[in-house]
Every structure is written in structure tokens, then in C-alpha cells.
Amino acid sequence: MEIIKNVKGTHDIYGEETNSYEMVESLMKSIAELYAYNGVRPPVLEYNSVFVRGVGESSDIVRKEMYTFPDKGDRLLTLRPEFTAGIMRLVVQNKLYATNELPLKLYYVGPVFRYERPQLGRYRQFNQFGVESIGNNSPMNDTEVIVLAYTILCSLGLEGVTIKINTLGDEDSRNNYRKALKEYFKDHIENMCEDCKSRYELNPLRILDCKVPEDRPIIEGAPKIGDYLSEASKARFEQIQDALSVLQIPYEIDESLVRGLDYYSETVFEFHYKSKAGLDYGAVGAGGHYGKLMEELGGPELPGVGFSFGIERIVSVLKDDGLLNDTKSTLDVYVMPLGDESVLVAEEIAVLLRNSGGYRVDMCFDKTKLGNMFKRATNKNAKYALIIGEEEIKNDSVIIKNLTTQEQMNIKVDELIDKFDELFSKEETQE
């Protein structure tokens, strides 16, 4: 019988890799919470209009990458390709902007789906972590979001992260810039790729994000956004640069940075990284400011700013740099019953250790030699073995063996929790 394999562009996460993902996600959540963010969990399925209206028809995500299908009621549904539009729908539908202090500070983690070419650290189903700060237009709010993202990357152990920033300006700035780009590209567009031809009609700013090598020399000669910024947008961008400098956050200005989603305005940014092994992962995270996204989804005109990280890409980078060495699963105790009579007593003790002591405990259910049980305990990376035989049952006791030092002791069952508390407390002090 043919073995059924996973769908192209998806991947199974198991074993130590699962621990790596959980470690990364847990650290990201904990740092976001230090910045007063709270978690949200929007559904994976949304009506297609959430992303067409929110992300924008000219974006590659909407034009080429979404998994969209009619349900049995002939409603057009989409597997979320990104979180921000769905979160804004959640905020508008539940009127969170009216019932909470602003800005709303929300974080999320979960799978997203994009039909694109699988490549280094990128899949068709992948996981994102990100934040959205909604309802405050201060340049310092943008700055703090950049600082939060940079803090997360540094806390994961990444060194030499490059922060690229740019501004797309306000609505008037962008309208003037689009006109200039239209004028510039009109004599070149026939010789450019098909995507650029579509972008020329829908949103010429998207052309600046083209990666086709033959098109890059033309794009390099295009007008720069800085020449079309309003005074207010120039001042805003300067304030953000000044704040990053005061906070000693390294950055560089990239005038070609536009991001791939139509809802961005004003500040946009990316976090680039090259692993110690020399692999260039490009942007491991990115984000920006948005002004009219909530209004597009039926809410009031409230600005926001956010970023997202691709967890797969982050985990790949951490592996390359040898920063995932402590993610192997460990057991506190492996329980070894000797003989049929000991199994039920051993299970009672295992439940006691889990429920009353909070210890991670596994147990051998097979009839096998004591030597094999010790091998299993070692393979499971257990710290202690707990042995229960006929003699121990008679004496209402157990044998505890430290699998590192090989020391062992006989302890009464009613003293067991106190003894393990003492042993683990001593270990923490020594660390």
C-alpha cells in the first residue's frame, strides 16, 4: 500500500524540533507581555473579503498566493495568509476600540497559508508570531514596536541583526510618489516582467519590491520617496530615527523598502540576518505602520503598527548558529516497577509526583530487566530513576537513584515529595 505523504510545502514538526518551536514562541510571548501586550486567537478561516479589502488587491498575496475556495453554502472563504487583517476584523466586529484603553496591544501566534515556492525556511503552511498596537499615532509607538521586535531577536541570541527602515509617507505623499513612478516606468514597463506590468496598473509602488535581476537596474534609477514626502511625514520619520539612535538601536535606511502589503503607510521596517554558517536568510521579520486598514474593514479610522516573525525561519537560523542545544526533552523521574505487584503501586506514586509535586514523570509498563529500564531512562534524558520492588512495597518506601552521580537512597513514600523538592532545589542553587 502506498504511503501517504504530507502536502508539498508543508512540514511535520516533532521530537526536539517541537521543543524548539515552543521555546521560541514562549520567549516571544513573554517579551511581548513585558511590553503590556495581550494574546488573541483569530480563526484560521475568514471571508475572502477580509483579505481583499484589508491586504489589498495589488499585493502578491491576494493576486497569487491565497488559498481561497467556496464552502457548501457557496460563500468564498480563505485560509489566512497573514494575521493583521483578521485581527482588525476581530477588533471591529467586537468593538474592542470602544471598550478598551487605546492603544490596543495584541500579540498572536499560529499558522498561515500562502501558495508560494517553498524555499529556505519558508513553507506554504508556516507559523507566525507578531504584534499589533492599534489606536495611537505617535511616532514613539512605531519606535517601541521596532524596539520590541529587536529585543526578541537579541534575546534569542542572534547577533548582528540588520534593521532596515523606510517611510512611505502619508496619503498625499504616496499619491504624488505614485504619479512620479508611473511617469518614470511608462517608458520601461514593456521590457519588465509580467508581475511588474500588473503592478504598474494596480499600484506602481509594488514594482520597487520586484526581485527579477533584469528589472533591478531599471528600478534602481526610479525616483525616491524622500523627494515626495510631506513635511509632516519627514518630521515623523526623523523623530523615529532620533529615538532609535537615543535607544542605541542600530538601523539603516533602505529607500527601496516598500513591503508587500498595500495597507502600509509611513514607517516600514525589516529585520535581516545572515547566519554564522553564511546562509543569508534575508528578512526574518518585518512590519510597519498602517492608517486606514480598520476603516477598510468597517471600523473607525484608527492607525496601527505591527510586525511579524516567521517561526520556521527563526528556528532555522537558531539551528545554524547552534543556539538550540538545550531543547532536548528531559524527564524529572522515570519510575521502574519490579514485578507485577509493583505496577499499580508505581502508578499511584507516579500520579502523586505529577499532581502533588508538579514533576514530569514517565513509567515503564513492560516486563523487562532492570538494566533495560535504566537504558530507557537514559534515552529519555531522565534525571532520577525511582525503583519499586517487593521489598519496597513491604516497607512503604522507594529507591531514588540520581542518574548523573549514580548515588541512590531509600525514602519513605510519605516523604517522597519533600525529598524531591529538596533535591531539585539543590540542583537549581548549583546552576
Image (spheres, rainbow, N blue to C red):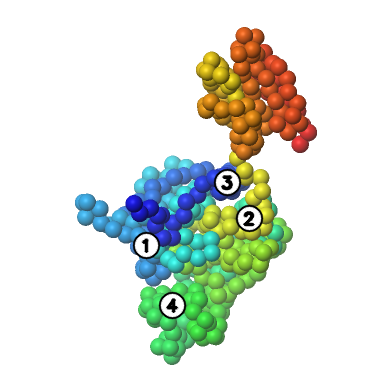
Residue that lies at the very extreme toward the right in this rendered image: 430
**Residues at marks 1 and 2 touching, judged by CB atoms closer than 8 Å:** no
Between circles 2 and 3, the one closer to the viewer is 3
Q: Disc 1 marks which residue?
A: 66
Q: Residue at x 64, y 14 (%)?
A: 392
Q: Disc 2 marks which residue?
A: 318
Between circles 3 and 4, the one closer to the viewer is 3
For residue 16, the mark is 3
**Quadrant placement of the C terminus:** top right
Q: Disc 4 marks which residue?
A: 204
Three-letter amino acid code at the position of disc 3: Glu
User: How far apart are the two marked residues, 2 and 3, measured between alpha carbons?
Assistant: 13 Å
Task: Find residue 337 and report its image quarter.
Answer: top right
Three-letter amino acid code at the position of disc 2: Leu
Q: Residue at x 73, y 20 (%)?
A: 409
Between circles 1 and 3, the one closer to the viewer is 3
**Residues at marks 1 and 3 touching, judged by CB atoms closer than 8 Å:** no
Q: Secondary structure at mark 1?
A: loop
User: How far apart are the two marked residues, 2 and 4, measured between alpha carbons?
Assistant: 36 Å
Across and down, in percent, residue 202 comes to: 38, 75
